[in-house]
Amino acid sequence: MGSISDTLWDVVICGTGLQQSLLALSLSRSGKNILHIDPNDYYGGAEAAFSLQEAESWVDRLATEDKGLFRSASITKPDVAGLSFPRAYSLALAPQLIHARSELLSQLVSSRAYRQVEFLAVGSFYIFKAPLDPAQQPSLVRIPSTREDVFSTTAISAKAKRGLMKFLKFVLDYDSPEQRDAWKPFVDKPLVDFLQEHFKMDAELKAYIIALTLSLDGRISTEDGLSIIYRHLTSMGHFGPGFAALYPKWGGISEIAQVACRAGAVGGAVYMLGAGIKSMATATDEVELELTSGDKVKTKLLVRGDGSVGDEPSISRLVAVVGSPLKSLFESTIEGAPTPCVAVVVLPAGSLTISGVANTFPVYVFAHSSGTGECPNGQSVLYLSTMATSNSKEVLSRALESFFSAVDHDQVPQCLYQLYYEQAAGVKQSRLDQLTLDLPGPSLSLSMDDTLLKHVREAWKKVVGDTVDDAEYMVFTDREPVDDDDFE
Amino acid sequence: MADQGGSNHGIARTSRTRTEEQRQKDLERIKDYRGLEDQVRHHAAKNDYSPDVFALTSKLLRLNPEYYTVWNVRRRCIISGLLSKPSPGSSPSKASPTSSPTATTTTSSADFSSSLSTETLPAPESRTTGKSGTTVEAEEEDEEQKQQTRQQHQQNDQQILQKELHFTIPLLLESPKCYWIWSYRLWILKQVIERLSVPVARMIWEEELGLTSKMLLRDQRNFHAWGYRRHVVDQLESPELEGKSLVESEFEFTTKKIEQNLSNFSAWHSRSKLIPRLLDERNADDEARKAFFEEELGKIGEAINVGPDDQSLWYYHQFLMLNLVHFVGHPTITPAFTQEERVTYLRREIEGIQELLEDYDDAKLIYEALFDYTLYLCQLQERKPNEQEEEDLRGWLGSLKKLDPMRSGRWADLERDLGLRVTREV
């Protein structure tokens, strides 16, 4: 077996973030010579999941770099007991939900990689309601998204329920010619405006709808908003009753990246962690790379993740470990439905006051039970996200407090650990520069954004060329016969 | 073999296109199947219902649960071999041996029956004299032995019967609407009542109730499961199983099903059937009945509010309205309502439904309901529609004609019957 310098690689992939890993998966049966490297000593890149130890190293490293996508990271450990040992935690940098109808899932199924991932159900979406009387405690109201939900909820008037039903019916048909006529004038305008003009929706219903879109600035366009709600509604019940989205156990998207890399390795790709690109030179039809490990390699194509900062706004994130199982959030509402391990709580714009000023942007709290494998039993992990602003760190702090008082009226849950950071948006387009392909930066979307999949597909095409039929993309058969026959 | 005709309520059934390889495989499978079938028929023709044949029926039924003749062969195997014979002179047997068609046939080499004493011990001769003390003791001993035998029989039978129930489960999961499997289960369950002690029989029937709940969870609109459930409930309530009324829990069950899926026609229907007995058992007085009626109106109102296009909801609503209107000679929720109260409730419903039109102006079932209920009101007050009502009826018919042009004949008939013919274009 020769050294890696002897081979003229068909492709060197740098970085094991989601997109690069999916590329490795897509090429895992191609027979191509693939060298897959990552300068970090862990898989997942910007979508990695960290033990407490790894989180600390990461924060220390960021303190010395400031050009990357992540910045302003810090860790706070309150002086309370209860925090378990570092490896008991797996804090996800990308805690995105994956809707049941998402293209990613179809690809994971057709490529058979889904078998390696344990998917958990994302349960209820809640909206945070500030109390009418400031002396009272705030509450969480479940957002209805099915007809039966709307029937059962006591939080909305009969007339408002009719309005909501009409909207849900509209969305399920939103792509038809008649409905298109209704929303075409609002295509790029905010969805809230369309809801106001066309449906005369009151503030409360508008808040419910926007919450379902997971829009970080609350101003998602009509077209994008309708599309994401459509996806939510059609995903509901798709893989089983009572849930519309999934979440991979053991760290979310990082688990998908790892499984994809594993598939790549089984397919013959060579993996090297702790190796990045020190320098590169392009010849006529090959790229020469000197790796940080000292190795020199040659490849026909280099694929990297573009780590540069893009134009769109950054987000602020607070990851909080909580010393309570927050059971009320993870109750299954329907008989026969799996117990959810993720719950979504939305604090709309204007629902919080920080130094006398209301929050401009919504705050999204993704609550994870220990069922996600991200923390020990009896604890939970909260991922709070909001648009990055001059005071977004305080906004998240206040949101955490308010969330605590809303979720448990008897006993305020205790925070055992906090990780704060800001993440900039990456570039949105791929870039092909002679023999180097830079995939777009990681998405800041809180739900899996299928548009990034097309870049992976384009990269795949670049590697396999025209000899392979497009229909074969991510379509594999099981390597060993597997018995799929189960009754439930 | 699992594919059957009939609606599967949107649950996908697999269909396959075959390669030559698969065709060969299928030919093999057909050959095996025919072989099995021949064997079973051969043995049955000879009245051979031995354990071997029993095993053959297991194989064959797994491949084709619809083969009802083979289920009958299995029944015969069970009765003639595996289950205990009722012993003469034992306590009043709940089993009527004549119910099994094979009572007259005897098996040959049934290992099971030969290992068990299926005959009673011969009655002690001294029984007939009945005077001395020894006779009483002998009688007591006799009774004890009969008890033991009975217990042994019951234990054996319980095992056999439960195994049979277990055997049908995977078949049911694959073919949830196969009549023959349900029928076999029922037959086994009947044997349970006849042969086992009441506590054991009850326990098994309660498990059966749990099974119907599971089946209804998998497919809420499986009407086999609903009908079957009613039968199971009837048995559990019967004196044979020392039963008490299950009407409250069954009512609660329909509530749960409705909350899971409003369009569950069977659940609403079941609910309506349970109400008369429910109220009777609660000894509901007029106040309680009124409260109950209002609660049901509220519930169906909420449902129609979010599902105005759902026929099953309107059927239930009509059931409640008929409670107001057709109360002579019919079991009714609120027999004590005065004429005034009936009119008030009907009017209130009509108004409430009209409100729905604000948001659902194209739901034809709303117009139909308004039309029907206005006529109900007139019926109740024994009068013809007044001018305003005629205008409303005309208007609603007009909407119906637009929304449901396929039934234009029906709308025209209604128009004519009520003398509502429109003299100008609406």
Image (cartoon, rainbow, N blue to C red):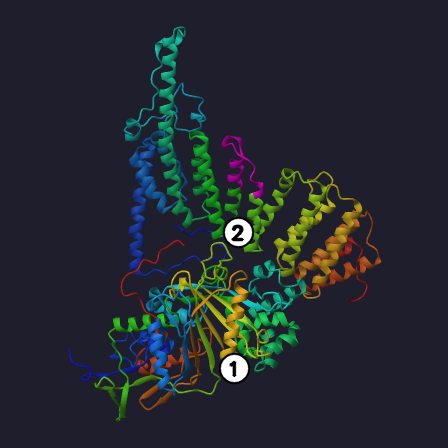
Question: Which dot marks residue A46?
Answer: none
Residue B172 is situated, as x and y percent measured from the top left of the image, at: 42, 47
Which residue appears at 25% of the width and 71% of the height?
A: A266
> Quarter of the image holding residue A294?
bottom left
> Quarter of the image holding residue A115?
bottom left
Using the image as rendered, state which of residue B340 and residue B51 is in the foreground. Answer: B340
Badge 1 amino acid: Asn
Q: Is residue A181 visible?
A: no
Q: Residues within 10 Å of mark 2 (few under 14, many from 20)?
A: many
**Residues at marks 2 and 1, CA–CA distance in whole angstroms:** 54 Å
User: Horizontal placement of A387 versus A12: left or right?
Assistant: right
Given the current orientation, which residue lies at the most extreme front position?
A: A79
User: Horizontal placement of B424 versus B158: left or right?
Assistant: right
Task: Output the chain of dot 2.
Answer: B
Using the image as rendered, state which of residue A259 and residue B378 is in the foreground. Answer: A259
Q: Which residue is mark 1?
A: A391
Residue B95 is situated, as x and y percent measured from the top left of the image, at: 44, 27
Residue B40 is situated, as x and y percent measured from the top left of the image, at: 32, 38
Range covered by the magenta-colored residues: B230-248
Residue B125 is situated, as x and y percent measured from the top left of the image, at: 35, 10
Badge 2 amino acid: Arg
SS state under label 1: loop
> Quarter of the image holding residue A2?
bottom left
Is B237 a magenta residue?
A: yes
Task: Output the chain of dot 1.
Answer: A
Quadrant for the C terminus of chain B in the image: bottom right
Q: Residues within 10 Å of mark 1 (few under 14, many from 20)?
A: few
In the figure, A377 relative to A63: above or below?
A: above
**Dominant secondary structure (helix, strand or loop) of the stretch shown in magenta:** helix
Q: Which residue is mark 2?
A: B221
